[in-house]
Image (cartoon, rainbow, N blue to C red):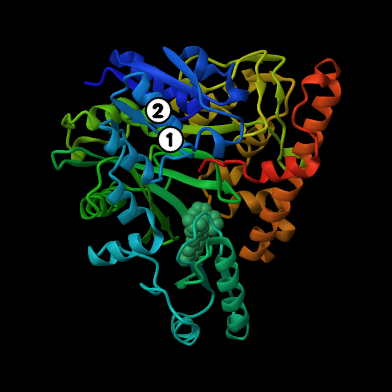
């Protein structure tokens, strides 16, 4: 087993990982940027080292600095968490060159499965269902012919895309030409790659994913599904396991598909296969996430497994001690993501100092967080504060516990989206489990607008929200500066709003 692990991350996930290390008797090494000097992960780790200024490009994304710390402190493994470098093949490569174990898949598997079209082609090869459409990048006349054959609406997607960028929804033949041109030029601008592919558009599918683990001895197991349909602008908000609609038979079929894909891609360690599931319970493979995910705790609660410890054991060459056919979810788990943001004000980030904080506890409650009273939530990263996870014997008991825990949860000094969850957890459609990927957007807009929302609206909203968030953050920072009159002399960076906005736009949103 390893002696010392470098945690190449921050916030709640760094805390989650160092806790697993401590239980395994492994020393933990934290890294931190200038604004994270007082962060919880720094306080709880066995050792902590500064790696640069606040912007992640100059700190958490600097492979050279991370490797230097790992080597200097004698680490024998690196855990990337999620976000930042977690899915960048350059990190496992750098680890390989330094003789340090990367806790995750190989660079090759990341490349084989991480890219959208590569994953889609692999799925076709091994007969895992994908959404009807093209396998390869396609030109305009070819794509239009296919669109006519498939029937509208269709979705144009950028080969280099991800997270909904460079997608165009096309409702009719008349719009096809201009949509194709727009999508191609948007893809060119965003990724330097204008290639597109095309899929039949699924109107109101669910987003359901399968958690897998693969060890170095050829065993690949499925830990079942997570239902992640409640999301807003490609940002998941509530996740649960099991899915309210997945039957044992569908679980077995989706698990077999996920395990087949992992084997075909030479996958090692924890990974997630994302699927869309339609009203008739047909499932379609979408993409692979080659990392531990934010929502992994719901799987832990219903399987009783510790995914981070298993990741570390797999990386150390241990065998998985069970076959997936023996794993059935027990009870129900649900997670809400508490963010420092203001739902009353277009979900603007709301960083700042936490004046008071009371954490819920009691039966069936787990809180994974990276904050504490008196700490200032920095403006430079994803504003995820806490993940509140409830477990119960039934979905109803789980929801009742989650509601109860949300009432106990208090945090002052910053705004959070806790109120949004109180609303969602009262909503009858949600309580009946009648959710899909557009459900939350429609719920937030109210019933009137529900029928007329297009993907373009989502994209436009997303851009608008980014700009608005940039401005809000700049104003917040300007106010902070004004309040700190005594420290004016040490104000090395000038307070230019434009600079701040630029920085804000480079913020990392973890998936
Ligand atoms: C789709 C789709 C409907 N039909 N493909 C969004 C980002 C990228 N990962 C794939 N996405 C989608 N692909 C077809 N053929 C709807 C989405 C989609 C989505 C998927 C999963 C989770 C949230 C989503 C939110 C909006 C759109």
In the image, 175 versus 353, the foreground residue is 353
> Relative to 405, does residue 113 appear above or below in the rendering?
below
Q: Are marks 2 and 1 in contact (CB under 8 Å)?
A: yes
SS under mark 2: helix
**Mark sitting on residue 64:** 1
Q: Residues within 10 Å of mark 1 (few under 14, many from 20)?
A: few
**Mark sitting on residue 422:** none
Residue visible at 29% across and 46% down? 248
SS under mark 1: helix
Counting from the top left corner in percent of width and height, residue 438 is at 58, 55
Residue 454, visible in the rendered structure:
no
Which quarter shows the N terminus? top left
Residue position for label 2 = 68
Residue visible at 47% across and 13% down? 44
> Relative to 349, does residue 288 appear above or below in the rendering?
below
Counting from the top left corner in percent of width and height, residue 364 is at 45, 20
In the image, 451 versus 15, the foreground residue is 15
> Relative to 177, does residue 352 appear above or below in the rendering?
above
Residue visible at 49% across and 56% down? 162
In the image, 130 versus 381, the foreground residue is 381
Instruction: Give the Cα separation between the discs numbered 2 and 1.
Output: 6 Å
Counting from the top left corner in percent of width and height, residue 273 is at 35, 50
């Amino acid at each position: 087993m390893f002696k010392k692990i470098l945690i190449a991350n921050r916030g709640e996930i760094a805390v989650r990982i160092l806790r697993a290390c401590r239980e395994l008797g492994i020393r933990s090494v934290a890294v931190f940027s200038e604004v994270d000097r007082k962060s919880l992960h720094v306080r709880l780790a066995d050792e902590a080292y500064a790696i640069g200024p606040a912007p992640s490009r100059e700190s958490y994304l600097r492979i050279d600095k991370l490797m230097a710390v790992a080597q200097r402190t004698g680490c024998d493994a690196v855990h990337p968490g999620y976000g930042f470098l977690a899915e960048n093949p350059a990190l496992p490569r750098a680890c390989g060159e330094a003789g340090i174990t990367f806790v995750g898949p190989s660079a090759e598997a990341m490349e084989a499965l991480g890219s959208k079209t590569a994953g889609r082609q692999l799925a076709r090869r091994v007969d895992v269902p994908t959404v009807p459409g093209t396998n390869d990048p396609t030109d305009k006349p070819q794509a239009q012919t296919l669109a006519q054959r498939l029937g509208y609406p269709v979705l144009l997607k950028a080969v280099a895309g991800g997270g909904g960028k460079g997608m165009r929804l096309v409702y009719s033949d008349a719009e096809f030409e201009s949509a194709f041109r727009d999508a191609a030029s948007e893809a060119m601008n965003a990724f330097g790659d204008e290639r597109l592919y095309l899929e039949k558009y699924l109107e109101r599918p669910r987003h359901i994913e399968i958690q897998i683990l693969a060890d170095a001895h050829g065993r690949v197991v499925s830990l079942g599904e997570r239902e992640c349909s409640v999301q807003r602008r490609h940002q998941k908000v509530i996740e649960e396991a099991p899915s309210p609609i997945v039957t044992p038979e569908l679980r077995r079929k989706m698990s077999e598909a996920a395990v087949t894909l992992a084997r075909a891609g030479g996958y090692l360690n924890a990974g997630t296969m994302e699927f869309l599931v339609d009203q008739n319970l047909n499932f379609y493979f979408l993409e692979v996430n080659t990392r531990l995910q934010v929502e992994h705790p719901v799987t832990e609660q219903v399987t009783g497994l510790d995914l981070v410890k298993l990741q570390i054991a797999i990386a150390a060459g241990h065998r998985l001690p069970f076959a997936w056919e023996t794993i059935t979810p027990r009870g129900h788990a649900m997670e809400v993501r508490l963010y420092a943001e203001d739902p009353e004000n277009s979900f603007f980030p709301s960083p700042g100092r936490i004046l008071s904080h009371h954490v819920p506890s009691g039966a069936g409650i787990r809180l994974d967080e990276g904050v504490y009273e008196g700490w200032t939530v920095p403006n430079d990263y994803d504003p995820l504060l806490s993940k509140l996870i409830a477990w119960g014997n039934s979905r109803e008991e789980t929801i009742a516990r989650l509601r109860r825990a949300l009432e106990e949860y208090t945090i002052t000094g910053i705004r959070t989206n806790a109120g949004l969850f109180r609303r969602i957890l009262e909503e009858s459609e949600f309580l009946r489990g009648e959710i899909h990927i557009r459900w939350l957007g429609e719920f937030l807009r109210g019933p009137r607008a529900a029928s007329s929302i297009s993907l373009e609206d989502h994209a436009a909203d997303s851009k608008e929200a980014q700009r608005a968030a940039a401005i809000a953050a700049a104003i917040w920072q300007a106010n902070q500066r004004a309040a700190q009159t005594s420290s004016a002399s040490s104000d090395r960076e000038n307070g230019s709003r434009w600079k701040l906005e630029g920085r804000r736009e480079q913020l990392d949103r973890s998936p």
